[in-house]
Image (spheres, rainbow, N blue to C red):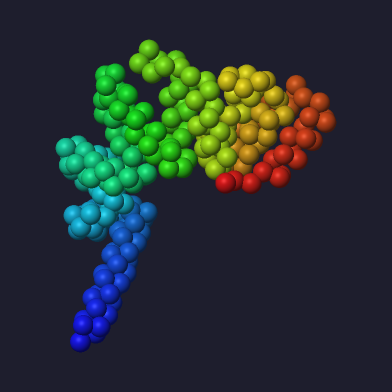
């Protein structure tokens, strides 16, 4: 009897987990289809049950408000972001960093808070957070110490994952010698990799402009490095 009861309990948890995953997928599908009201309705019960992904998207939708066709509620957004990051959700940590940057850009305390959450997400391998963190260390700002070594460290991690904006930034760093030695071959490589993305932000133009200052041998080597590159 006890064995049968244990089996029933295990099956019930498995079914609940499957149902929860299906509900999350359905809510995400609504979000991707820009059906934001339906997405919000789908995420809410999951968020209340403690699902970190749902909590993150509750924060995103409520903070975005009018841009998603729903009432904006920053207090509720902050509540859900906080719940998500307390569970270590990397996307939530990244969005939490954005929340502080976008909402409270004028105070040192909140800029530092933004970098804190970018760092937590970046350390979990979140490519976009790594790019934001790298820029935070690069941009000259009296509130955040400029550190080219940290900037290159995080930008490279993001670029190596295939994040095109970071690849483009790494290209400019190698072209100008910011935190790294000037290296036109590596600059061309990163610009070239960035150029294949729909979010190129000028990588192709930067590559072609740089090519006018390179030898045919350098260009050939840069193209070889581009072909052999694989994200990780």
Give the x, y percent position of residue 79: 19, 41
**68 or 182: nearer the eye?**
182
At 61% from the left and 42% from the top, the residue drawn is 196
At 78% from the left and 35% from the top, the residue drawn is 221
- Compared across the picture, whether 99 is left or right of 146 comes to left
Task: Specify whether residue 107 is in view.
Answer: yes
Give the x, y percent position of residue 198: 54, 42
Give the x, y percent position of residue 138: 48, 21
Seen in the picture, residue 94 relative to 138 is either above or below; the reply is below
Question: How many numbered badges does the structure rendering display?
Answer: 0
Task: Specify whether residue 8 is in view.
Answer: no
At 62% from the left and 22% from the top, the residue drawn is 180
Seen in the picture, residue 209 relative to 35 is either above or below; the reply is above
Q: Residue furthest top?
A: 142
Q: Quadrant of residue 32?
A: bottom left
Question: Quadrant location of the N terminus?
Answer: bottom left
At 57% from the left and 46% from the top, the residue drawn is 232
Q: Residue furthest bottom?
A: 1
**120 or 177: nearer the eye?**
120
Seen in the picture, residue 39 relative to 4 is either above or below; the reply is above
Give the x, y percent position of residue 84: 27, 46
């Amino acid at each position: 009897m006890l064995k049968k009861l244990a089996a029933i309990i295990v099956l019930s948890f498995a079914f609940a987990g499957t149902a929860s995953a299906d509900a999350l997928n359905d809510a995400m599908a609504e979000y991707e289809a820009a059906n934001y009201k339906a997405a919000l309705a789908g995420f809410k019960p999951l968020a209340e049950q403690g699902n970190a992904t749902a909590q993150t998207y509750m924060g995103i939708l409520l903070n975005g408000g009018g841009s998603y066709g729903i009432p904006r509620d920053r207090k509720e957004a902050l509540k859900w972001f906080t719940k998500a990051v307390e569970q270590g959700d990397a996307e939530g940590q990244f969005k939490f960093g954005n929340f502080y940057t976008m909402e409270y850009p004028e105070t040192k305390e909140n800029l530092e808070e933004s970098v804190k959450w970018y760092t937590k997400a970046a350390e979990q391998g979140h490519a976009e957070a790594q790019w934001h963190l790298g820029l935070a260390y690069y941009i000259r700002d009296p509130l955040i110490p400029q550190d080219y070594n940290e900037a290159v460290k995080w930008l490279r991690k993001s670029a190596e994952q295939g994040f095109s904006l970071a690849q483009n930034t790494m290209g400019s760093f190698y072209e100008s010698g910011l935190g790294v030695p000037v290296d036109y071959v590596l600059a061309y490589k990163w610009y070239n990799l960035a150029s294949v993305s729909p979010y190129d932000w000028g990588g192709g133009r930067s590559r072609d402009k740089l090519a006018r200052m390179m030898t045919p041998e350098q260009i050939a080597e840069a193209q070889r490095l581009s072909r052999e590159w694989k994200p990780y």
